[in-house]
Amino acid sequence: MERVTVYIDGFNLYFGMKAKGWRRYYWLNVHLLAKKLLKPYQELIATKYFTSRVSSMPNDPQKAKRQGEYLEALGTVPGCRIFYGHYLEKIIRCNRCSHSWPTHEEKMTDVNISVELMTDAYQNKFDTAFLVSGDSDLVGPIKAVRRIFPLKRVVVGFPPRRHSVQLEKVANAYFTIGRKKIADSMFPDQIRKTDGYILRRPDRWK
């Protein structure tokens, strides 16, 4: 069997689904999705999910709570590991009106993916890497894996509306993740943890 590790850029996937208006699919079991991306001759070794903790906003006070519930749900799935980056606050200024406001930029996801991809390649933990992202910053690590380990393959699965020509050019193969695979990979509305606590799908995601 061909060994596959799946690396998922959480925010790239999230914003792709958001662009399609697929809020009801945010309660997504990414490990199950990873399994559905495989061919019959492949076996899933691990799913690695990369994200950052968000903060609640005045216009969305439940934002952090929803994400926290979701990350706890992912934490119940054997074979799925979560890697965290962070948000950096930036001040945006309007040159016309001199008004300024804070915004947040997600950092470290591309670095964390690159480190895990290269480490796993060096430790021979996969034959094929599936990279779920449309972030062109990942061109470098893909090229490095293919150059140093010519027998290993890197396949890119583009989230909805996140196609990248740059990634397409450097990957061994690529495809776009369709709605059906996402829709068929949802968590149940309620998940009971081992301590008895019940995680619930946020109402806003139904």
Image: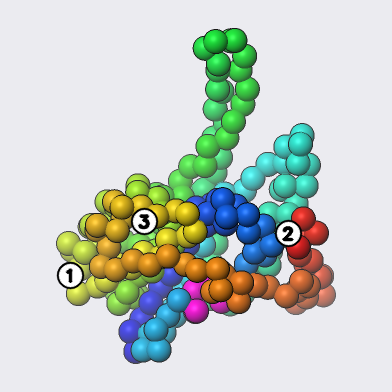
Query: Which of the marked residues, 1 or 2, is nearer the chain's N terminus?
Result: 1
The percent position of residue 137, horizontal first and vertical second, equals: 35, 47
Classify residue 180 by image quadrant. bottom right
- Residue type, mark 2 in image: Trp
What residue would you read off at disc 1?
A: 150
Helix, strand or loop at disc 2?
A: helix
Query: Which of the marked residues, 3 or 1, is nearer the chain's N terminus?
Result: 3
Residue at 46%, 50% in the rendered image:
109
Relative depth, front residue between 162 and 107: 162
Above or below, 144 relative to 191:
above
Compared across the picture, whether 184 is left or right of 193 comes to left
Residue at 42%, 80% in the rendered image:
38
The percent position of residue 203, horizontal first and vertical second, equals: 80, 59
Q: Is residue 148 magenta?
A: no
- Residue type, mark 3 in image: Val
What residue would you read off at disc 2?
A: 205
Q: Nearer the viewer, mark 3 or mark 1?
A: 1
Residue 106 in sight = yes
The magenta stretch is 31-36
Relative depth, front residue between 202 and 107: 202
Helix, strand or loop at disc 3?
A: helix
The percent position of residue 99, horizontal first and vertical second, equals: 62, 14
Q: How many marks?
A: 3
Marks 3/2: CA distance? 32 Å
What residue would you read off at disc 3?
A: 115
Q: Nearer the viewer, mark 1 or mark 2?
A: 2
